[in-house]
């Protein structure tokens, strides 16, 4: 909710200079609140499509070198070239795990 208009302390020197800050109050640690924030559309977070070595490290709990080897084995299994990326779906099929279980670990 927006707070009523009131005088605010200047951002520069910490003293009251009598100005009104954009018609909205300022909360400590936050930027100015606007009407757009209260009426904004909720956007669903996107699911990750591509899996990286960092993701493999987090999901399996291994080191960087092992994660790169796993990505290489998956790339070889699916006959992909070096510049082609590995998807989360391919990773799940290769290891026989559920897609939803992996996605929950990635986000």
Image: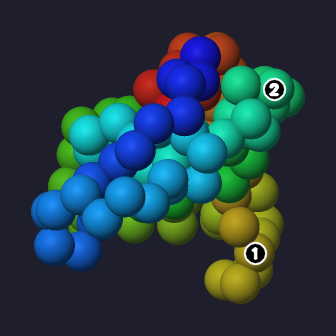
- Residue in the foreground of this view, choosing between 96 and 99: 99
Q: Position of residue 51 (x, y in %)?
A: 59, 52
Could you tell me how far apart the alpha carbons at marks 1 and 2 are, in whole angstroms? 41 Å
Q: Position of residue 105 (x, y in %)?
A: 45, 26
Mark number, residue 39:
2
Residue at 74% x, 47% y: name it: 49
Marks 1 and 2 close (CB-CB < 8 Å): no
Residue, far left: 14
**35 on left or right of 3:** right
- Residue in the foreground of this view, choosing between 102 and 12: 12
**19 on left or right of 13:** right
- Residue in the foreground of this view, choosing between 15 and 82: 15
Q: Position of residue 27 (x, y in %)?
A: 35, 36
Q: Quadrant of residue 22?
A: bottom right
Q: Which residue is mark 1?
A: 84
Residue at 68% x, 54% y: name it: 50
Task: Please name the colour scheme applied to the rendered image.
Answer: rainbow
């Amino acid at each position: 909710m927006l707070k009523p208009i009131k005088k605010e302390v200047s951002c520069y020197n910490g003293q009251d200079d009598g100005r009104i800050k954009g018609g909205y109050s300022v909360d400590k640690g936050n930027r100015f609140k606007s009407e757009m924030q209260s009426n904004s559309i909720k956007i669903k977070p996107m699911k990750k499509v591509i899996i990286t070595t960092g993701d493999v490290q987090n999901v399996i709990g291994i080191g960087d070198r092992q994660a790169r080897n796993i990505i290489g084995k998956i790339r070889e299994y699916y006959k992909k070239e070096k510049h082609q990326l590995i998807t989360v779906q391919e990773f799940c099929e290769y290891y026989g795990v559920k897609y939803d279980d992996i996605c929950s670990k990635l986000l």
